[in-house]
Amino acid sequence: MSGAGAGTLLAGRVVLVAGAHGGLGSEAAKACARAGATVVLLGRKVPRLNRIHDAIAAGGGRALLYPLDLEGAGADDYAEMAQRIGDELGRLDGVLHCAAEFKGLTPLLHTDPADFARVLHVGVTARWWLTQACLPLLAESDAASVVFAIDDLALTGQAFWGAYGLAQQAMAALVPMLQAELGDAGPRISGFQPGPMRTALRGRAFMADQDRDARDPAVYAPACVELLSPAGAAWRGRTMVASPEPRPA
Ligand SMILES: NC(=O)c1ccc[n+]([C@@H]2O[C@H](COP(=O)([O-])OP(=O)(O)OC[C@H]3O[C@@H](n4cnc5c(N)ncnc54)[C@H](OP(=O)(O)O)[C@@H]3O)[C@@H](O)[C@H]2O)c1
């Protein structure tokens, strides 16, 4: 989407970003704040969350920290989180899922069993538990949106992508399944598949100096804002596959 009008797309709205100190999460969180949202920053490292908070505040935006490790959090923790957002901010309009665990390319046969479970938990179960706890509050919004960041299904469905690859397939299945259950009038559920981005996650599969396709995650932040806002209505129950702007020659 163009930058025109992006400054008010989320005015007065409250958006939760999970994985808010990651590559895409941090850029999306800052973009949401620039678009007028109060942003709840969920992540497991407080100093890094603080840096995103300070960048948003310096730009005149508003953000709150919600430190939480998705690996250890249970359904009660998400229920408490939703309750606190409702009590303190009075509403929740959007959730953007950018948290993901990826340990690097590994043959399934040699994958540490605990790592396999951990990656699936953060990539699938925790995303769903968080969403499930937030849906009642989201349902009170006039334009609620839940957006799941999803990696390239063809790429990550190949050998050695392991539990991370399986989690992407699960997320792609969850989007239309959940939307069908919530119906046309319920909160909007979308997937977002950005192109390759220069982030810590990508760096575990590709050598940075040979990864010419990867772009700054900031390139994809405006699409996250669009999907979280009423402007993303066309993506109800669907996944937006975004391609980067052409590179300057
Ligand atoms: N990079 C790409 O090329 C690419 C392409 C397509 C889609 N995506 C998707 O985009 C999303 C964001 O990925 P990214 O590239 O921005 O990766 P990233 O920079 O590694 O960010 C992932 C974030 O998830 C957080 N996280 C991991 N485990 C967590 C836990 N247990 N509790 C709380 N937070 C946890 C990480 O925190 P720590 O820093 O503490 O580990 C990090 O902040 C992911 O869903 C990914 O699948 C990425």
Image: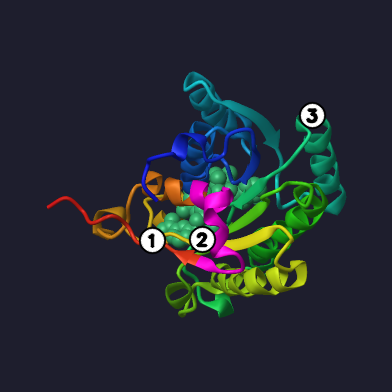
Q: What amino acid type is highlighted by mark number 2?
A: Phe
Residue 105 is situated, as x and y percent measured from the top left of the image, at 46, 68
Question: Quick check: can you spot residue 74?
Answer: no
Residue 37 in magenta stretch: no
The residue drawn where x is 53% and y is 67% is: 239
Image spot of residue 17 (x, y percent): 61, 44
Q: Residues within 10 Å of mark 3 (few under 14, many from 20)?
A: few
Q: Is residue 71 left or right of residue 24?
A: right
N-terminal of the pair, mark 2 or mark 3, is 3
C-alpha gap between disc 3 and disc 1? 36 Å
Amino acid type assigned to the residue bearing label 3 in the image: Glu
- Residue 192 is tagged as 2
**Does the Cβ of the disc 1 residue fall within 8 Å of ligand 1?**
yes
Disc number lying in front (3 or 1): 3
Mark before the other along the chain sequence, 3 or 1: 3
Residue labelled 2 has its Cβ within 8 Å of some atom of ligand 1 = yes
> What residue would you read off at disc 1?
195
Residue topped by disc 3: 88
